[in-house]
Image (cartoon, rainbow, N blue to C red):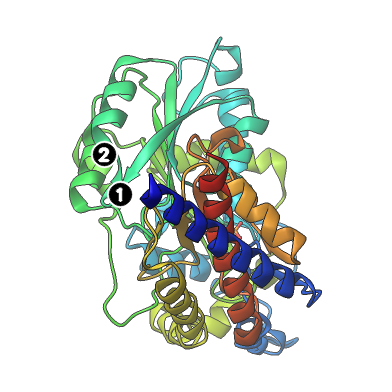
Amino acid sequence: MSNIRVSLESTEILKASLEKEYLDYKARNLKLNMARGKPCREQLELSNGLLNCLDEKDVTDETGFDCRNYGLVDGIPEAKRLFAELLDVAVENVIVAGNSSLNLMYDVLSRAMLFGMKDSVKPWSDEKRIVFLCPSPGYDRHFGVTQDLGIEMIAVPMTSSGPDMDIVEKIAGADPDVRGMWCVPLYSNPDGITYSEETCIRLASMKTAAPDFTIMWDNSYFVHHLHDEFDSIPEIIGVCSEHGNKNRAYEFASTSKITWAGSGVACMASSLDNICHQRKHMGYQSIGPDKVNQLRHVRFLKNAEGVMNIMKKHESILRPKFDIVLDILDKELGEMDQVEWNRPKGGYFISLFVVPGTASEVVKLCKDCGVELTPAGATYPYGKDPDDRNIRIAPSFPPLDELEIAIQVLCTAVKLAAVRKSVAK
Ligand SMILES: Cc1ncc(COP(=O)(O)O)c(C=O)c1O
């Protein structure tokens, strides 16, 4: 009995001291943002060469095509070659487009709704129900696209080697309404998990009840390493083909976080059938993408080696930011039960799991203190984190000093929400 009283008293003392610490931060009228994985200004400056790498004598692609004019709906040959080299696929399997890979993903799925995929029996919108598997935590904008198009979502838990494949195989193998799946296979958003080779092979080879089951292979972080020793994944389009499922995967990437997030170049890669299918519809949608931007990207980046060189410079800007976040988390939250986070080798995020049932409170506490985070729940389909536990930390944008304060505030909020919860029990 007396032990319980002592522990209640010490919890009350801890709570009072955390409340005070929190109010002290609040009094500082902070205005800090860690909500989105945006490159910081210093990173954007790395690509200022894009502003003057073309001139009036250099406006044609390698075939002599004038990039200022209409045409080439699937991109200029040298831009295709650059992405083909980076993604380890053949040039014929690549379409290079405008600035956003998310836009390409949205278009591929809207076309599936309107016309069906290459192996569909009818347009998806003519079906009663279309379902996508969503490894979770995952990228909120994937879930937004799916929801916007009326596609139902089923959350699949992530493991340290990718989505739980027993669950994926069971659902995709049994239910013909399940037509596809989102995957961020390298340095996943937000967990920084890289799919194992076994996971990739199981995804490529599994039996699916739907003939047009489609993997949206969002390889956004394909060159975004944070350490010398980096992860890699198999080339999925070839692996699908080897296992008799040649039209299963669409791969996406862009230079958004290589050059400029708002003015980069995006691409998709897939089987020849799929590429023809998309190109046909794209031909009605547009007379051609911004090829001048494609040309200046090729001039500026040159080749895969040029890309890796600039990515090393990004790494040197980003790495200290990730390190500072991880150091503070270790120091402030290392002893807490039920609180854990990943140590990503690449990508843009740190995924923090707080005491179950407190993530929304933590995000609110931070917001009231002037620190903006991705909304709690955003990393799950329909914005609903079943355990109210996951918070995505995006360290790239704020300067180091601001990041440090923001994480301190976050740690105070994590502890305060936990202690408030335990007192309320
Ligand atoms: C997993 C993932 N896919 C896609 C994007 C956006 O890509 P893009 O800028 O090419 O549209 C992001 C941006 O954060 C992302 O994290």
Classify 10 Å Cα crowding around label 2: few (below 14), some (14-19), many (20 and above): many
Q: Secondary structure at mark 1?
A: helix
Q: CA distance from mark 1 to mark 2?
A: 7 Å
Classify 10 Å Cα crowding around label 1: few (below 14), some (14-19), many (20 and above): many
Label of residue 204 in the image: 2
Q: Percent position (x, y) of residue 399?
A: 64, 84
Q: Which residue is mark 1?
A: 236
Q: Residue at x 54, y 59 (%)?
A: 414
Extreme residue toward the top, this view: 128
Give the left or right position of residue 315, taking residue 30 as reference: left
**Quadrant of the image where one finds ligand 1:** bottom right
Give the left or right position of residue 373, taking residue 131 as reference: right
Q: Along the line of sight, which residue is nearer the eye, 4 or 293?
A: 4
Q: Residue at x 25, y 56 (%)?
A: 234
Can residue 262 be seen here? The reply is: no
Extreme residue toward the front, this view: 2
Q: Quadrant of the N terminus?
A: top left
Query: Height in image: 72 above or below 136?
Result: below
Q: Residue at x 42, y 76 (%)?
A: 331
User: Marks 2 and 1: in contact by CB < 8 Å?
Assistant: yes
Q: Secondary structure at mark 2?
A: helix
Q: Residue at x 65, y 42 (%)?
A: 283
Q: Amino acid at mark 2?
A: Ala
Q: Percent position (x, y) of residue 244?
A: 22, 33
Dot 1 or dot 2, earlier in sequence: 2
Q: Percent position (x, y) of residue 159?
A: 29, 46
Q: Amino acid at mark 1?
A: Ile
Whether disc 1's CB lies below 8 Å from ligand 1 is answered no
Query: Height in image: 388 above or below 319?
Result: above
Query: Height in image: 406 above or below 107?
Result: below
Can residue 382 be seen here? The reply is: yes
Q: Percent position (x, y) of residue 353?
A: 45, 53
